[in-house]
Amino acid sequence: MLRDSVRQGRPTIPSFMSSGTDRDSAGRQLALEYLAEAWNTAEDEGIESLALAHASLFAALATLVRAHGEEATAKLVAGLPDRIKAGEYSLERQTH
């Protein structure tokens, strides 16, 4: 499994729940595992994690805007502060 190939000492991407089907959840989980592997490779090649984070956010938001439009994406992003404060994106908290 790809998650197992992520080197020790680096965070693994935890499973996350989805309101979609099991197939949707499995696809999203696999996508996260691929991203974790690509992230590790980029860091190994000298790309700083903060640069990766900014590029990833830009790419994700641009994709969401293209797929759903500015208004829907803005609504999604508006809900992020509460989710961040609740710990949904804190890997250390989710993996312990």
Image (tube, rainbow, N blue to C red):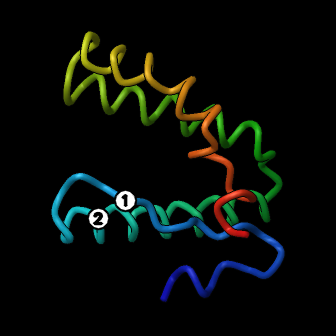
Q: Is 90 placed left or right of 23 in the picture?
A: right
Residues under numbered marks 2 and 1 in contact, where contact means CB atoms less than 8 Å apart? yes
Which x, y percent locates residue 23? 18, 70
Disc 2 from disc 1: Cα separation: 7 Å
Residue matched to label 2:
25
Residue 30 falls in image quadrant: bottom left
x and y percent of residue 14 in the render?
55, 67
Q: Say what secondary structure mark 1 lies in.
A: loop
Residue at 16% over, 63% down? 21
Q: Mark 1 is on which residue type?
A: Met
Q: Amino acid at mark 2?
A: Ser
- From the viewer's perspective, is residue 43 above or below residue 61? below
Within-10-Å neighbours for mark 1: few <14, some 14–19, many 20+: few
The local secondary structure at tag 2 comes to: helix
| Horizontal side of residue 36 vs 46, given as left or right | left
Q: Nearer the viewer, residue 61 or 75?
A: 75
Q: Is residue 9 above or below residue 85?
A: below
Instruction: Identify the residue at horizontal 53%, vertical 34% (top origin).
Output: 83
Q: Position of residue 85 (x, y in %)?
A: 64, 32
Which label is found at residue 17?
1
Residue in the image at 38% along x and 26% along y: 62
Residue 44 tag number = none
